[in-house]
């Protein structure tokens, strides 16, 4: 039923059944439709339509999709082959559910990536070791040598044996060009720049260092957790050989994945459930936003055959992490008569963190006002017994709902975050630790699926 594809996307269809988790898995929740949910204030009061949704939703099925995305594919950087592999997989799943599925391609900027290798296997293997490469450094090469930590790039303490080594240094943008030039002059084969620690609960992400021109050696930027683990290893071993590989990815095309089931009548209202499937450099993206992606897939599966009046659209956005590029591209292609048909867009971004303080389910609206999407989810929360944990609508953009609200379409973003502010994201956010084992609660994922699934079904049943 696919309108456009590209490379075959059937190769990953069997991966859901066959993938093996790389690490310990979170517990699968088990409650009946009428049972009181964890964290709720009372037993649910569900109508027959709600029960059709909640009795069919399965966090275990969603987990299998999440294993493919975050463990088998890993970081899904916008426009790269890994993001395309994920797009093909997601489109194949929507095909199987019976939706009319298409890929919506759009151009994105070049990417510069690196991989850290550990020949002695001294570094933790349950962590992603992708990093960012400097576009102004040596690209398309692999350099090997023992790690040498010289401290601050502003005042490095150079050992006698720099030649042939991989130099680690605390990064400062202003000092970067002179430091890299000196490291190369002393015979270093690569430079690993270490970010400043951010204020808890935030941790610095991997980055592609800027400000360099024709550096003769590869230069990479790592995440805060990678910095810590590298220095911990250097503190206890006499030799830590590393390999540093860099690559430039140019002429890139990213894709939105959109599945549609037409409603009754040519001008039926549109109800959309969505998430973004790309991730940032170095992050497997299990919660951000593998969780919103698999929520969208699972609700699509459950709603595929249920009677509705509205047109259903399930969208997985590419290149959200680069500035909402995919969803903005999509909205720009919508004629006004299409925009006018939208009843609600339910955008899901980071809906399953296992971080204990993330006890609030935030209803986030770009204009801070209620709309049909926030109203429907709040009503679902009341029926499920979650009134105290739902906060909002609160004014906040920075996810794909913003692209729709900028043109007057009712949309909102839904997410588990810290109690004091929606800015309080979990420590693994945008880091190599955004994995299933370290950052996913299937209990929260199940509750999120029930909230959005019942809200979307309620919105789609009426004309």
Image: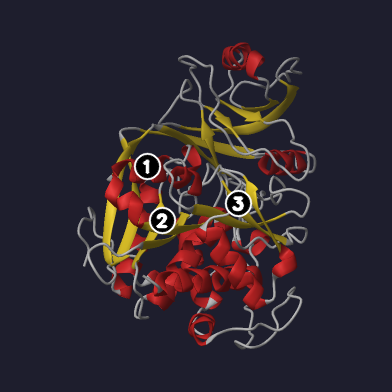
Residue drawn at x 76%, y 46% is 201
Marks 3 and 1 close (CB-CB < 8 Å): no
> Residue 79 bears which disc, if any?
1
- Helix, strand or loop at label 3? It is strand
- Helix, strand or loop at label 2? It is strand
Q: Is residue 22 visible?
A: no
Tell me which label, 3 or 1, sits earlier in the chain: 1
Residue drawn at x 70%, y 52% is 426
Tell me which label, 3 or 2, sits earlier in the chain: 2
Residue ID for mark 3: 364
Q: Say how many tags the image has.
A: 3
Residue 397's x, y, as percent? 56, 43
Q: Residues within 10 Å of mark 1 (few under 14, many from 20)?
A: many
Seen from the viewer's position, the closer of residues 191 and 430 is 430
Quarter of the image for residue 326 reads top left
Residue 309's x, y, as percent? 34, 73
Q: Quadrant of the N terminus?
A: bottom left
């Amino acid at each position: 039923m696919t309108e456009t594809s590209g490379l075959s996307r059937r190769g990953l269809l069997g991966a859901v059944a066959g993938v093996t988790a790389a690490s310990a898995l979170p517990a699968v929740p088990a409650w009946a439709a009428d049972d009181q949910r964890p964290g709720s204030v009372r037993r649910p009061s569900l109508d027959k339509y709600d029960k059709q949704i909640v009795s069919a939703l399965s966090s275990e099925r969603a987990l299998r999709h999440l294993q493919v995305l975050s463990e088998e594919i890993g970081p899904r950087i916008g426009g790269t082959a890994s993001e395309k592999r994920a797009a093909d997989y997601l489109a194949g799943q929507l095909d199987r559910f019976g939706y009319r599925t298409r890929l919506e391609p759009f151009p994105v900027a070049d990417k510069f990536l690196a991989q850290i290798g550990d020949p002695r296997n001294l570094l933790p293997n349950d962590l992603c070791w992708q990093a960012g490469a400097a576009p102004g450094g040596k690209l398309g090469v692999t350099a090997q040598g023992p790690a040498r930590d010289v401290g601050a790039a502003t005042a490095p303490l150079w050992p006698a044996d720099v030649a042939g080594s991989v130099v680690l240094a605390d990064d400062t943008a202003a000092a970067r060009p002179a430091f890299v030039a000196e490291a190369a002059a002393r015979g270093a084969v690569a430079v690993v720049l270490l970010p400043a620690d951010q204020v808890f609960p935030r941790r610095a992400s991997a980055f592609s260092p800027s400000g360099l021109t024709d550096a003769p050696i590869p230069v990479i930027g790592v995440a805060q957790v990678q910095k810590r683990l590298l220095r911990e290893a250097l503190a206890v071993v006499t030799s830590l050989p590393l390999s540093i590989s860099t690559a430039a990815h140019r002429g890139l095309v990213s894709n939105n994945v959109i599945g549609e089931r037409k409603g009754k009548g040519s001008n039926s209202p549109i109800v959309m459930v969505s998430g973004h499937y790309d991730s940032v450099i170095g992050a497997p993206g299990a919660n951000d936003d593998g969780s919103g992606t698999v929520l969208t897939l699972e609700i699509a599966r459950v709603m595929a055959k249920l009677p509705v009046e509205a047109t259903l659209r399930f969208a997985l956005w590419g290149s959200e992490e680069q500035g909402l590029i995919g969803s903005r591209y999509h909205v720009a292609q919508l004629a006004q008569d299409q925009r006018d048909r939208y009843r609600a867009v339910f955008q899901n971004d980071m809906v399953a963190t296992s971080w204990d303080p993330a006890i609030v389910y935030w209803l986030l609206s770009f204009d801070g006002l209620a709309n049909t999407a926030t109203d429907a989810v709040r009503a679902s929360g009341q029926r499920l017994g979650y009134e105290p944990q739902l906060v909002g609508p609160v004014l906040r953009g920075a996810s794909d709902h913003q692209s729709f609200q900028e043109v007057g379409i009712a949309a909102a973003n839904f997410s588990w975050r810290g109690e004091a502010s929606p800015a309080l994201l979990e420590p693994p956010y945008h880091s190599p630790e955004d994995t299933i084992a370290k950052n996913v609660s299937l209990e929260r994922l199940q509750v999120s699926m029930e909230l959005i699934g019942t809200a979307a079904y309620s919105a789609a049943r009426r004309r």
